[in-house]
Image (tube, helix red, strand yellow):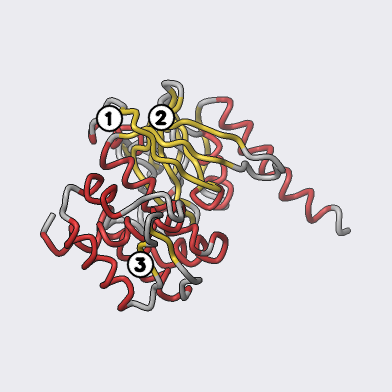
Amino acid sequence: MSDIRDKIKRQIEILGIAIENPEKYKIVDLEVMFNCNEATIKRDLKDLRVLGIEIHSVSRRGLRVESNIDPKVLNDLINDYILLNNSSINIEKSTHFLVNSRKEAALSTVTMIQYCIDKNLIAKILYKKQNRKNTELREVAPLIIFYGKNEYRLFAAEDKTYKQFLLSRIQSVEITNKKFKPVSKNKIDSVFATSLDFWLGEKTIKIKLLLLKPWYSRRKLPLLVENQTIIKNSDGSLGLEAEVNSIAEVAQWVVTQGRGIKVIEPLELINLVLNLAKGVVRNYKSDS
């Protein structure tokens, strides 16, 4: 990473830390965290103030942000930060949603999680599940921030199991001093390789689909997952075989494609597709 990228990344992380922990960290603490000197940290704070962010080091206390940050500035900072760490993410819609729902906390969540990823540090997160009133304190090993269904998500290890968390539902983040063993990029990539969209898991299931010519002749052949194979049958149809980690996602995709795709196996996937299709039909029967 170039010096300018290091500088931008560090400045945004300092801001995120100050938002989440007002007056907890002094300049000397940041010198240790980012392995730089006092003059560098002070220049970083000055650069942030040029952006209209009232961040100051309070005498005998620590860093704090004095006022609310313009949402447009927050959007730009988060977009820049996400792209610095993962250039493949579709940022616009997901950043807008995150800032709308979490305001300044959006930036602190993203930066503190990424700091833990970079340093292989366990993070304590206060997490609120959907349709739950109470929050849960979780200790996780953050591995990567990714994008799915218009939202930023955290792929993390917890109790030796891979899980995902919506960043918009993380209420707070605490950086601990506990290290975790890094997970290789190849291992992470192998988990994503069997995911159609955003569901991740280590257990995979083999599926077989039949693609009829009237369907695939009107569009490009689907790329569901990286490991798929497509075989041409003697009657002109195509067979698609793959390993996936969520047949629920496959079932939802099949139903949206209309006529021309048939599930051959497994039986569990066939039943899921039938139940989803029957549910759609019932929606219209109830109106008659």
Residue designated by label 1:
183
Q: What amino acid type is highlighted by mark number 1? A: Val
Q: How many marks?
A: 3
Marks 3 and 1: in contact by CB < 8 Å?
no
Labels 1 and 3: the sequence-earlier one: 3
Tell which residue pokes out farthest to the top in this image: 160
Tell which residue pokes out farthest to the left in this image: 2
Residue designated by label 2:
157
Residue 242 % position (x, y): 37, 33
Q: Where is 219 relative to 198, above or below?
A: below
The image quadrant that residue 226 belongs to is top left
Would residue 241 be seen by someone viewing this image from the given angle? no
Marks 2 and 1: in contact by CB < 8 Å?
yes
Q: What amino acid type is highlighted by mark number 2? A: Ala
Q: Is mark 2 on a helix, strand or loop?
A: strand
Residue designated by label 3:
77
Labels 1 and 2: the sequence-earlier one: 2
Circle 2 residues within 10 Å: few <14, some 14–19, many ≥20: some
Q: Foreground residue, 15 or 197?
A: 15
